[in-house]
Image: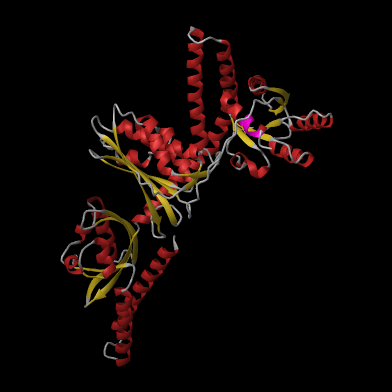
Amino acid sequence: MSSRHKKQSEEADEIVRLRRRIAELEEIHPNDERVQAATRQAEEKFRSLVEHSLVGIYIFQDGIFPYVNPKAAEVFGYTKDEIAAMPLSAFLVEEDRCAADQYIQSLFSDQASVVHFFLKGRRKDGTIIEIESEATKTEINGNPAIIGTFLDITGRRKMEEELRKIQKLESLSSFAGGIAHEYNNILTAIIGNLALAKMYAKPGYEVYDVLIEAEKASLRAKDLTSQLLSFAAGGTQVRKVVFIQELVREIVGFSVDSKTVACELSIPDNLWTVEVDEGQVGQAIDTLIKFAQKTTLPNSRIKISAENMIISRSSALPLREGRHIMIAIEDQGNGISEVELQTLFDPFGSGDKKGSGLELASAFAIIKKHDGHITAESHFDVGTMFRLFLPAMEETPQLTTELFAVHPARTGRVLVMDDEEIVRVVIERLLLQCGFEAVLTKDGAEMLRLYREAKEAGKPFEAVILDLIIQNGMGGQEAMKNLIEYDPNVRVIVSSGYSNDPIMANFRDYGFSSFLPKPYKLDELKRVMKEISYSK
């Protein structure tokens, strides 16, 4: 329970206690002046507390509410006079009216002295709210009555539901990460060997076309493992300053099929900047846009907008206070049911989800790991709207221009440590295509020996590629510590198919020069090798 709700509950208890004290005083020597003075004092305190209370307070007698305090009237959207002339049923949803009658009967029949219950209320404008109430029997003007307090817990219930959703996703994260790790090792070998096979085949021949299709399928499998790792706890995050308006426009450009659906953009240029993993956040936004495309009816449009937003302490969203950017993605479809909406971000939830179960779960996990949040609301025959929130930077950084020099091709020897033989073999072949000779080893101890021998012989390695997770032997992190102690200028690339380790997200903090998540393509290996070859 939050401190605010705790304070409100304590206040409600004090109000009920005072009302009971007044009733007791009225029964004790009603003609005694001292008793009358004490009664007046208690009533004045009661009235002041009730009128200024943050808790809804009511008196129920003879089937109506002869009194409600200002807060109770505010919560339901009526005036106090309007409420006084209305029956209890007017303030409750139909399915909860019978339960409310039972609570009242249990008090009037002395079956219970106090009842504590939860009901769904209906405001004047028709909005459904969640109500937590506590009531007790009293006597007013010689007739039995009920005095009660209530809290509007709609926001609290919504937050609790969001937290349950987050916890459920987290419970599946380790399982997903473990699968992705093993799968990525295999995919590294598959994708690498396909790239090499294409080099020996000639374009235009059937075998080349077959290899192209196999490579496409492998890259689709890579996308799947990326979604699994995004869904898993942790995940590689290489954060940088991103102008979200540019990212959204870029994604819309290659994701939205203008032949089948129109897209209405409302993205201002003055959006605050964010510091995020551009690839992961782009994947999440792309997932939501693709879902909107699938659900939008023919001849309709998708609306994508964004705005700066300040999140306050009173917000029902599980976000920290301060500056955020909000991206809204709205389709014009048939909408989805309330049941499906509750499991929309659950990969194992019910509902069709237009085949987007894992994708939506991954998008939710990505944004959560960026300290953001995604909400969804839907209405039949209107459509579904996603709102994506990301924390914004406090200040917009100054833009800088980087000049990239063109360097000649560089060669040399690279020491590779990986415990998977199929991965070592393909990396050796890929490095040859990059102009480097590979020396292979399967654990950290042997890698350190080979590195020292090469340096002492005057033939140092150009770089080292370390697998982060070694099943039997010294792993990448321990090996890196020993390498730096021996040679502070060593250039090391950390590689892993298990992105949950924070080392992959903060590789420079551990002394690594670059990182190479598995699986990777030949072009990605070439880029990394070029970067570190001229980094010192």
- Answer whether residue 208 is magenta in the image: no
Classify residue 121 as left or right of residue 348.
left
Q: Is residue 449 above or below residue 59?
A: above
Q: Is residue 115 above or below residue 456?
A: below
Nearest to the observer: residue 408 or residue 311:
408
Residue 468 in view, yes or no: no
Residue that appears at 51% across and 41% down: 277
Colour scheme shown: secondary structure
Q: Quadrant of residue 6?
A: bottom left
Residue 481 in view, yes or no: yes
Q: Quadrant of the N terminus?
A: bottom left
Estimate the x, y position of residue 282 in percent, counting from the top left: 45, 37
Estimate the x, y position of residue 223 in percent, counting from the top left: 49, 29
Nearest to the observer: residue 63 or residue 202:
202
Residue that appears at 23% across and 30% down: 299
Residue that appears at 27% across and 35% down: 301
Q: Is residue 373 above or below residue 83?
A: above
Estimate the x, y position of residue 69 in percent, counting from the top left: 26, 70
Nearest to the observer: residue 270 or residue 447:
270
Classify residue 490 as left or right of residue 328.
right
Most extreme residue toward the top, as rendered? 205
Most extreme residue toward the right, as rendered? 457
Q: Quadrant of residue 470?
A: top right
Dominant secondary structure of the residues highlighted in magenta in the image:
helix
Most extreme residue toward the bottom, as rendered? 33
- Total numbered badges shown on the rendered structure: 0
Residues in magenta, as a range: 528-532
Q: Quadrant of the C terminus?
A: top right
